[in-house]
Image: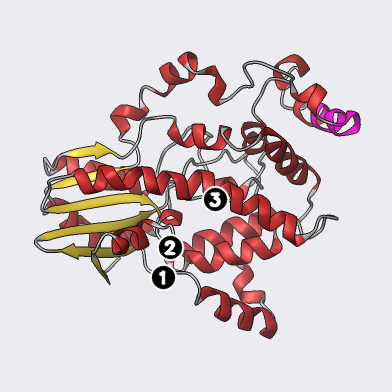
């Protein structure tokens, strides 16, 4: 599914129907060859492990916490470790605060291009006739008229089509560890702020070239690989503080049942990550560095932490020393 609902963790809680979760952790089924490959490739990922790191430079301390945006009972244990950190911080920065998120409806009304194609050809003319028929029939089951469908952003359609029973509380639900951290900060009277404006994550998705969005949508429509396996693997890996492993396995297995080269899948996924992760990470850095809080908590989706352009490596490039902390 569309980069597994934006890696399930780093943007929105994608909508699940009332279906039963049928997924299992793919890491338990790796062949010896795949395990060896995972060992090799994970070594190339900076800061591949850990959901809580402390960046230190002079008298400045930045706690970087990787979050999951959907609720899970396993978060209770994490919050026992994180609550004292939040209460003792001078400020907390989240991707978007609940106060800002409350303006989402207004933003969507004033910026229709976030979810729709405001001008130019629609999907009915950009897609091959047989692909458009397939999509139209599928979306008709959801009560979506063809005229409306033709103007919808493909990424939005793809996320709306999920029937996973493995969690999720609606496309615009913003739940999970972020909420818990924000509530603790408010109760402790710790100042909170946003790293970006509401809707910026959607802007990043909409900025992906429309033809590539369409290609990903069609792959999602046609693939019969058990998507729930991806969701369960991602969630389990998150709570084991090994999310980068699940992200690698996803890149190997996504759309493997379709006639598409792995190099093309890799290109599509890398472009997706460049828009939704890398560019946003770089945009957040000036906000983080501009904060004058001696002890700062930065809580963002866990997929934003690892990698060469992850938040942790970007802080390292700014001269911060990094050490893992309890999660």
Label number found at residue 105: none
Q: Relative to 29, say whether 20 is above or below.
A: above
Query: Disc 1 on helix, strand or loop?
Result: loop
Q: Residues within 10 Å of mark 3 (few under 14, many from 20)?
A: many
Would residue 230 appear left or right of 262 to someone viewing this image? left
| Residue that badge 2 annotates | 306
| Residue that badge 3 annotates | 273
Q: Residues within 10 Å of mark 1 (few under 14, many from 20)?
A: many
Whether 311 is among the magenta residues is: no
Q: Residues within 10 Å of mark 2 (few under 14, many from 20)?
A: many
User: Earlier along the polypeptide chain: callout 3 or callout 2?
Assistant: 3
Which numbered disc, 3 or 1, marks the residue closer to the eye? Answer: 3
Q: Relative to 173, say whether 299 is above or below.
A: below
Dots 2 and 1: beta carbons under 8 Å?
A: yes
User: Earlier along the polypeptide chain: callout 2 or callout 1?
Assistant: 1
Query: Disc 2 on helix, strand or loop?
Result: loop
Q: Residue 225 location in percent, x, y?
A: 75, 56
Which numbered disc, 2 or 1, marks the residue closer to the eye? Answer: 2
Say which of 247 and 272 sits in front: 272
Query: Disc 3 on helix, strand or loop?
Result: helix
Q: How many marks?
A: 3
Q: Residue 71 location in percent, x, y?
A: 42, 48
Q: Residue 311 location in percent, x, y?
A: 36, 56
Would residue 140 appear left or right of 164 to someone viewing this image? right
Label number found at residue 49: 1
**What is the span of residues highlighted in magenta in the rendered image?**
128-137
């Amino acid at each position: 599914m569309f980069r597994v609902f934006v890696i399930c963790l780093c943007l929105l809680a994608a909508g699940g129907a009332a279906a039963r979760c049928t997924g299992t952790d793919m890491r338990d089924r790796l062949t010896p060859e795949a395990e060896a490959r995972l060992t090799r490739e994970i070594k190339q990922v900076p800061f591949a492990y850990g959901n809580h790191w402390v960046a230190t430079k002079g008298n400045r301390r930045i706690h970087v916490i990787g979050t999951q945006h959907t609720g899970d009972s396993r978060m209770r244990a994490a919050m026992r470790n994180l609550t004292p950190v939040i209460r003792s911080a001078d400020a907390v920065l989240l991707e978007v605060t609940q106060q800002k998120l409350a303006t989402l409806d207004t933003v969507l009304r004033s910026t229709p291009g976030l979810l729709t194609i405001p001008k130019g050809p629609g999907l009915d003319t950009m897609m091959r006739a047989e692909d458009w028929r397939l999509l139209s029939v599928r979306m008709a089951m959801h009560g979506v008229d063809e005229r409306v469908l033709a103007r919808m952003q493909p990424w939005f359609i793809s996320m709306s089509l999920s029937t996973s029973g493995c969690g999720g509380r609606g496309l615009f639900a913003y739940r999970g560890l972020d909420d818990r951290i924000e509530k603790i900060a408010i109760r402790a009277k710790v100042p909170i702020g946003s790293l970006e404006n509401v809707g910026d994550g959607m802007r990043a998705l909409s900025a992906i070239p429309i033809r590539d969005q369409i290609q990903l949508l069609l792959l999602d429509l046609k693939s019969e690989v058990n998507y729930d396996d991806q969701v369960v693997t991602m969630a389990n890996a998150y709570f084991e503080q090994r999310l980068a492993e699940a992200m690698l396995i996803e890149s190997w297995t996504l759309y493997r049942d379709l006639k598409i080269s792995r190099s093309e899948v890799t290109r599509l996924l890398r472009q997706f990550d460049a828009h939704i992760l890398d560019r946003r990470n770089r945009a957040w850095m000036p906000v983080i560095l501009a904060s004058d809080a001696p002890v700062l908590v930065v809580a963002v989706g866990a997929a934003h932490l690892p990698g060469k352009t992850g938040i942790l490596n970007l802080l390292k490039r700014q001269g911060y020393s990094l050490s893992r902390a309890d999660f």
